[in-house]
Image (tube, grey):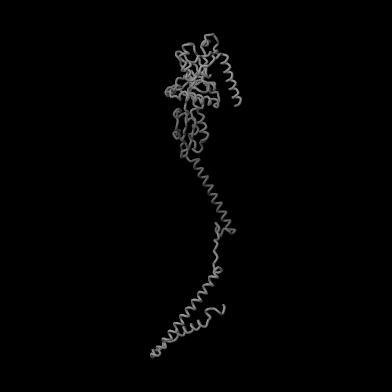
Amino acid sequence: MAKNDSYSTRGSAYVDDDADDAYLRPAQPSAAPSSRARASRNAERDASRGQASDRLLDKAAEGLGQRIEDDEPFLRTRRRVPVKKGLLPLWTKTRWGRIALAGAAIAVLAGGVALVFSVKSFFDHDPCFRIDTASSIQTVGNSQLSRTDLLSVFGSDIGRNLFYVPLVQRRAELEQIPWVQHATVMRLLPNELRVAVTERTPIAFVRVADQVKLVDAEGVILDMPPAMMAAKHFSFPVVTGIHPGDLLSARKPRMQMYQKFLAELDASGEKLSEQMSEIDLSDPEDVRATVPAKSTDLLLHFGEQNFLARYRVYQSHLSEWEQQYPRLAAVDLRYDGQVVLKMADGKTGDGKTADTSNTSPAPAKADAPVAKPASKPATMAAAKSIAAKKHAARQRREAQR
């Protein structure tokens, strides 16, 4: 330390000595008044010296505090960095510790494998998971099919363990039934199966050989006993042109055309489709419908569009055609501005004898709501030319496909 430290001054040393002497000096007996005065003066002097000593101490403390503040960066303690400890205890770092740890891991793994095999054996062989009778199979959603029809798929599963029933295979077998559109098979613990089916909805009768069956929107032919069919009170037109030997990819577009045909006829709310007794879908570009007319049936050719407008043309001219052509057999409505009539017994509209393929033009009223009368009558050659053009266009479209 330097010699000029505040604690090494003479004044401070003198004050300290006097203070110590005053503290250690024994008490004096009471003296005379002069002695008391002298003592009072000495006390005042000591007090003034004490104040000076206090001032010196304050200055010394201020100097010491300043030095401490200057040295503070060097006196600060560094922050402790936490050290991460390993997950394994220290004894695992030794050789025998690692051996013990490996043995424990193998024992735990072997115990887990044994537990898995014991649980699997329990589920595979315990009698509580066995399907004992057909009452353990629930059936939901079947209205056209009987429960017996659905259970015929699960005949080999009676007495089998629940977990050995091939659900995917059983679902595929159920969907092979024509009436089943979608099926779901689920396991219900401990020993039950739940079978839910969505059945197809018939939308038309279909003539197959000499039988009448049902058909849905996708062209799937549905069989039903005549008694049940009569009990259901179905009211559909009879559809032809849908054959079981055709692929579904060919039957489905024809049924879509059938639905479009009925939807357009019924768009006015008059339910005109109920007047169609039979609809021929053999030609997807020409929907042909049979409608009753007086004592016979008429065959109407609607083409593939504007079904309601063309039926209005037929309605507006029917009475006139029946008076003029009593042997009217067919009406071709596919041509705009003209209608081609076909007579029975090989006669055309003008009374000339011809084969059954001959056609003749039909006059149209000037006030017809849809079709306008043609400026020139349609001849047989013109009709054949139009039909040939349509046939060629259809062949080009099929070739492009």
- Front one among 46 and 211: 46
Q: How many marks?
A: 0
The residue shown at (56%, 54%) is 103
Seen in the picture, residue 21 relative to 229 is either above or below; the reply is below
- Front one among 6 and 84: 6
Residue 13: where, in percent of width, then height? 51, 82
46 sits left or right of 390 in the view? left
Seen in the picture, residue 166 relative to 301 is either above or below; the reply is below
- Front one among 115 and 379: 379
Q: Quadrant of the C terminus?
A: top right
Seen in the picture, residue 329 relative to 214 is either above or below; the reply is above
Quarter location, residue 232 = top left
Seen in the picture, residue 159 relative to 396 is either above or below; the reply is below
Q: Quadrant of the N terminus?
A: bottom right
Residue 99: where, in percent of width, then height? 58, 56
Residue 120: where, in percent of width, then height? 51, 43
- Front one among 178 and 56: 56
The residue shown at (44%, 21%) is 274
Residue 351: where, in percent of width, then height? 52, 9
